[in-house]
Image (cartoon, rainbow, N blue to C red):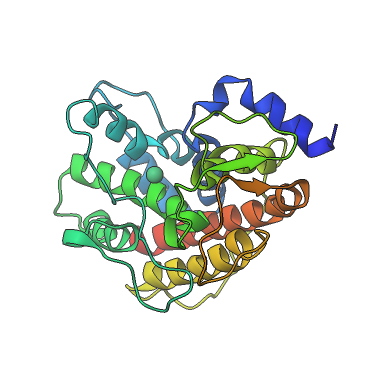
Amino acid sequence: MHRYALVFFCVCFSASCLAWGGRGHAAIGALAQQNLTPAALSQVQELLRDDLDRYEQASGRTTLAAVASWPDEIREVAMKTDPAAYKGWHVRGNQVCSTKLGPCKDGHCVDELIISYTRILRDKSQSHRARNEALKWVVHLVGDLHMPLHSGINRNGGGAKVSMEDVELKPDATLHTIWDNELANAALKGWKSSARLEQNVPALTEDAPTRWMLETRDVALHEVYEPLSGFSCEAKLPEPIRIDAAYQQRSVAVVRHQIEMAGLRLAQLLNESLP
Ligand SMILES: [Zn+2]
């Protein structure tokens, strides 16, 4: 059996298959925390004091890695009573073959929410709870924005059915879920980034998250869609789309690069927002 296929097999029969990209978000949080200035780190620790979990109980969580999936967790709870809760908040449906921005209803899409939660995080007149939650949203959404399919889609959207060479998938697996889980987990297993934020980088402008998103949309075009056999901007591929071993292997470097970009950019955003 192919080396990568074996990794996928292990991943899919463990509990981590149920996690919704949790491993990727934690890796981004950890990398960002390693790159915080002392001033930003001490404010992050203060903001995570008395952190609450999805049921509003003391969470005991004290690191960016530990809180990075909280927006997914509260959505899971909210969806029990409202299936449309937080719909669209973690993504933006930019078409990969167009330069137009995707829709963003009421400012509830990934880049606009990072911008508005960063404003709350910076604002010391806001309550401790509001800034604590803003921090958790920013940490999570900077991660989501760098997942290619959260920033770009094509005619075969993230919901396209897939099959994977040498890998047993759940029947409801889609292009989106394999990038969130199988491909991400395989790339992150046993890997830890030690990337460092460069010194003296130019300060971020407020619209930086939108620029990051458009760059990630191009990653979706070049790394998620174009390598699919038969892909073209005009046509819809027949489903299930076959994800062969070469595609799986290629995705390892893509996932790791995106995780590093997300972690370093998140660190810069927090360093500038919590001076
Ligand atoms: Zn998310």
Residue 200 relative to residue 107: left or right: right
Question: In this view of the protein, can residue 271 be seen by the observer?
Answer: no
Question: In this view of the protein, can residue 212 be seen by the observer?
Answer: yes
On the image, the x and y values in percent for residue 45 come to 38, 40
Which residue is at a point 70% across and 24% down the rendered structure image? 10
On screen, 172 above or below 265? above
Q: Residue 206 falls in which quadrant of the image?
A: bottom left
On screen, 8 above or below 33? above
Figure quadrant of the C terminus: bottom left
On the image, the x and y values in percent for residue 84 come to 22, 40
Residue that extends furthest to the front in the rendered view of this protein: 238
On the image, the x and y values in percent for residue 75 come to 28, 35
Which residue is at a point 35% across and 50% down the rendered structure image? 90
Residue 42 relative to residue 2: left or right: left
Q: Residue 145 falls in which quadrant of the image?
A: bottom left
On screen, 152 above or below 98? above
Which residue is at a point 50% across and 46% down the rendered structure image? 176
Figure quadrant of the N terminus: top right
Ligand 1 falls in which quarter? top left
On the image, the x and y values in percent for residue 31 come to 57, 48
Q: Nearer the viewer, residue 147 or 65?
A: 147
Which residue is at a point 50% across and 38% down the rendered structure image? 21
